[in-house]
Amino acid sequence: MTIHWKNTLAAVCFAVFLGGPAIAETASATIEAAFGNTVAVTDGDTQYTVFYNADGTFQNSLGMSGTWALTGDTLTLSVDGAEIGSTSLPAGKAAGDAFEMTDQTGKTVQVSIVPGRN
């Protein structure tokens, strides 16, 4: 895995924390609403899913796993104890939403929040 790929993947992982219905539009509510859902990502020709967990961990279908931390509205991801990036969490997204995000490299990726773990 190259650093560029890690940065792109990290940015996409950050971008997918979404808010649910009737939840305040804050970063904390957004991260809590992401638990238990599947985040489907299309990054060019690469498609994968990401799961975020209430215990501060995440994993994806490409074999990457690590931890997340939230400070204010800034989400930081780490893999194997090394920080791989951080970004502001979007607010107001919910399960069932599909939208575009821009990663840390300026590349546009497609994100869908699929209700439940698939």
Image (tube, grey):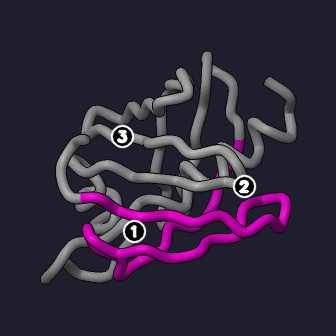
The residue pinned by badge 3 equals: 51
For disc 3, the neighbor class at 10 Å (few under 14, some 14 to 19, many from 20) is many
Name the residue rendered at 67%, 54% in the picture: 43
For disc 1, the neighbor class at 10 Å (few under 14, some 14 to 19, many from 20) is many
CA gap between label 2 and label 3 equals 20 Å
> Quarter holding the C terminus?
top left
For disc 2, the neighbor class at 10 Å (few under 14, some 14 to 19, many from 20) is few
Sequence order check, earlier mark of 1 and 2:
1
Q: Which portion, as a residue range, is magenta? A: 85-114
Is residue 53 shown in magenta?
no
Name the residue rendered at 70%, 49% in the picture: 45
The residue pinned by badge 2 equals: 44
Number of numbered discs? 3
The residue pinned by badge 1 equals: 27
Q: Quadrant of residue 110?
A: bottom right
**Cβ atoms under marks 1 and 2 closer than 8 Å:** no
Could you tell me the amino acid type at mark 3?
Answer: Phe
Sequence order check, earlier mark of 1 and 3:
1
Could you tell me the amino acid type at mark 1?
Answer: Ala
Could you tell me the amino acid type at mark 2?
Answer: Gly
Residue furthest to the left? 22
